[in-house]
Image: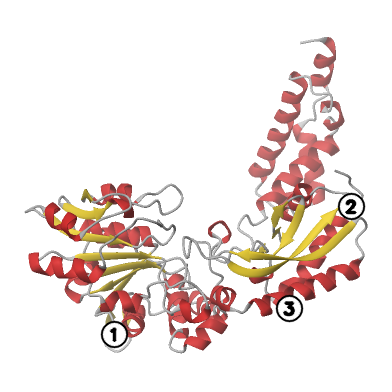
Amino acid sequence: MDDKQKALLKSLPKIDEVLVILEKRGTLERAPREKVLESIREVVAGIRSAILTGSRDAAAFLSNESAADAAAARIERLHEYSLRRVINATGIILHTNLGRAPLCKEALERIVEVGRGYSNLEFDLASGKRGLRYDHIREILCELTGAEDALVVNNNAAAVLLVLSTLARGREAIVSRGELIEIGGEFRIPEVMERSGAILREVGATNRTHLSDYEKALNENTALIMKVHTSNFRIVGFTEEVPVPELVTLGRRHGIPVMNDLGSGCFIRLEKYGLQREPTVSDAVKEGADVITFSGDKLLGGPQAGIIVGKKDQLESIKKNPLNRALRIDKLTLAALEATAKLYLNEQEAIAGLRSLTALTEPVEAATRRARRLLQTLKKEKFPGVTLALKKGFSMSGGGSLPTEQIPTVLVALRSGNLSAARIDEKLRALPVPVVARIAEDEILFDPRTLAAQELPEVRNALRAVLASREKG
């Protein structure tokens, strides 16, 4: 340590003096005294470390006022929310990292209504006795899907885990090699099966599996035949898979239940809207599988949930599994899911009311109109050094659904002579309401398919804040 460092260390801010400054500023009203003291100590420790490592900027923070500013900033950050609303301009409709499906207004209203006070979550109002939380959603799910019974847990991985734990724990579950998918976040079907206690029995090849492969694998330890819909990828070319009805026939012949994991559950026929065919849950029920699992926050357009529908006898045993309590959903998810499901009683109401479905199914002309509105709005701002244009492009479904679907759209492309696209993107993400867009060939691209009409002025205001800076680079 040299003499300069020793002199700087002697000039470190005094904790008690910094505390007096913060007390006068009212910072002690923002957090407990011990937390404020902890923040001051952390600031001083940081300055000390900077001095010892030879930082040339350390001297600038030696005053008590500077230390007070830094400590106060730490306290204020405690009051900021980490989970925030963002504006999704990427064109990825069910963006996993951005929360997947936005909730409909009916779901939000029900969350507020149920969450603001007490509710009959597990209370039967007719009998005055304890009830089941699943009863609030069971009837509408059975009505929409044609299933005998329904159960909801916290996500589809949990649904798969619970079913396997109940029906195949300690015994074999037969599944095609081509269906051993990764379901996101590095969670894989074989790993979920292992945690459930089921024994994985792989059959067939990656691209082709025949009914005879399942038949040959059957033995006295077989508990379940499992079908996994590859909702997040497609194998094309020389392929073959066994349809669910054939597996159901095989299962019934040998007294073995069949499970169909749909993954991204769909309630409407998407091909009517120009999209690729995706099996609906009601179709899956008609095919006869004993248990069907799917997500609530993907193509269904609701909150995160794992939905299990199927035969009543199988569902009853699944409900009794002690693991069910650890995986159950809360009252707010139930409220949102019930409201979302009721929209499907009228398909057009679901299309209009669920923002993800609107984005998936609306004609490209509607997206083009929003793109033109945004372009005109931004051109009026006359941002210096900025060029704006419309470009044809494609949106994506995202969220592990419709993996090969490219949905036509029109993008608003922005290029700046003053700031790189990467720097603009960084500054947009740093705003109080972050805007997340695409970058391609040093342009920022805004996709109107994931932008609601009321968000267009917010995008304009965000760019005002970002492009008003004289920063270069």
The residue positioned 86% from the left and 60% from the top of the image is 387
**Dividing the picture into quarters, in which one does residue 380 lie?**
bottom right
Name the N-terminal-most of marks 3 and 2: 3
| 417 over 12 or under it: above or below | below
**Dividing the picture into quarters, in which one does residue 267 lie?**
bottom left
**Which image quadrant: the N terminus?**
top right
Location of residue 83 in the rendering, given as x and y in whole percent from the top left corner: 60, 58
The residue positioned 83% from the left and 32% from the top of the image is 61
Location of residue 41 in the rendering, given as x and y in whole percent from the top left corner: 69, 33
Q: Nearer the viewer, mark 2 or mark 1?
A: 2
Instruction: Give the residue pinned by disc 1.
Output: 128
Name the N-terminal-most of marks 3 and 1: 1
Disc 3 from disc 2: Cα separation: 30 Å
Instruction: Give the residue pinned by disc 2.
Output: 469
Regarding residue 431, the answer to whether it shows in the image is no
Q: State the residue lying farthest toward the left.
A: 220
Instruction: Give the residue pinned by disc 3.
Output: 369
**Which image quadrant: the C terminus?**
top right
